[in-house]
Image (spheres, rainbow, N blue to C red):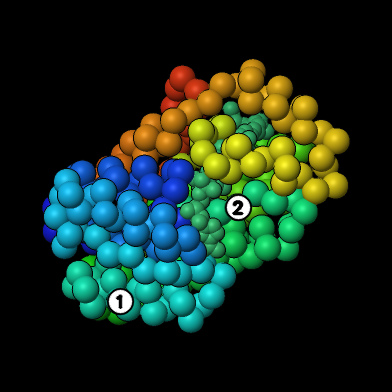
Amino acid sequence: MALNGKTAVVTGAALGIGRAITEILVQNGAKVALLDVNEAEAKALKKALDKQYGQEKTIVIKCDVESEEQIKAALQKTADTFGGIDIVCNNAGILNEGEWEKTVSINVLGVIKVTYLALKHMNKLTGGRGGVMVNTASMAGLGPFLTCPVYSATKHAVVGFTRSMALASAVSDYGIRFNAVCPGFVETDLKVKFPFKLGQFSHLSDVGKEMVEQMGTIQPSVVAECVLELVTDETKNGDHLLVKHNEKSYVTFPEVL
Ligand SMILES: NC(=O)c1ccc[n+]([C@@H]2O[C@H](COP(=O)([O-])OP(=O)(O)OC[C@H]3O[C@@H](n4cnc5c(N)ncnc54)[C@H](O)[C@@H]3O)[C@@H](O)[C@H]2O)c1
Ligand SMILES: CCCCC[C@H](O)CC\C=C/C=C/C=C/[C@@H](O)[C@@H](O)CCCC(=O)O
């Protein structure tokens, strides 16, 4: 799938992995709506992208993925501005075991809300052009992450939701592919703040730091390249790309029933 003439929506676009995803999509010819609660950082990113690619390539929309109303308005503004939606990157997420209900709300409910509301624009059965959604899960969505049980649970939920939506879409002919990226430790603000966000598991912060040291870290741009692969490779649906410090591989899930 070539990105020229395509429109993408990226949540959590202002910083970290979302910022890198936004950059690579624009570099490859897509127009991108930058959705984030941090409007100032999103505007700063737009300004930088304007200089290189022109100001018509991106829009910034302040949007909290916890709010159905704000998501609905943001998707409508994107479709009105760019003439439709082809790509959604559900990337906004937090790690906060102290505020675990908010973590579930953003990481799970936020992904589901954006997906269902974007479906209305993209589903070929309801007049959309089809396309692809790529969710940012985590390596912690594929196995236990002892310092962050709720975060890990939310990422397992993203994996299960992505796989199930991929099947539902294929069987229903929505014309939309659903994939996920599952990175290990990535050099972002989330990683920097991690030791202070462990809530009742703060006594395990040294264990977390040791894991980071042992496993090594990944640059956001490497994760963005993997997202680009999941967006552009039209053979990928229900696929999960695990990104480690020095390798990437597609996940093979155990067969059930
Ligand atoms: N950093 C890592 O090690 C790592 C590893 C695997 C997966 N992830 C996942 O990658 C995604 C991005 O994380 P990151 O590391 O870039 O974090 P980050 O904190 O650097 O950036 C997150 C961005 O999301 C935005 N955001 C937060 N809450 C939001 C909300 N309610 N609505 C809209 N935007 C919101 C923030 O303002 C910020 O711009 C998350 O889903 C995270 O779980 C991160
Ligand atoms: C330091 C910041 C916290 C970032 C949180 C992240 O989303 C990154 C999570 C990174 C690692 C999680 C590790 C979990 C490991 C396992 O349980 C492992 O078994 C997963 C299986 C993957 C594999 O098949 O290799």
- Specify the amino acid type for callout 1: Lys
Name the quadrant containing residue 229. Answer: top left
Residue 93 rendering spot, x and y as whole percentages: 55, 54
Alpha carbon of mark 2 to alpha carbon of mark 1: how far? 25 Å
Sort mark 1 into few (<14), some (14-19) or many (20+) by Cα contacts within 10 Å.
some
Residue 234 in sight in this render: no
Q: Is residue 128 above or below residue 224?
A: below
Residue 51 in sight in this render: yes
- Identify the element where label 2 is drawn: loop
Residue bearing mark 1: 77
- Identify the element where label 1 is drawn: helix
Q: On the rendered structure, is 34 left or right of 128?
A: right
Q: Residue at x 74, y 58 (%)?
A: 99
Q: Is residue 185 above or below residue 87?
A: above
| Cβ of mark 2 under 8 A from ligand 1 | yes
- Specify the amino acid type for callout 2: Ile
Residue bearing mark 2: 94
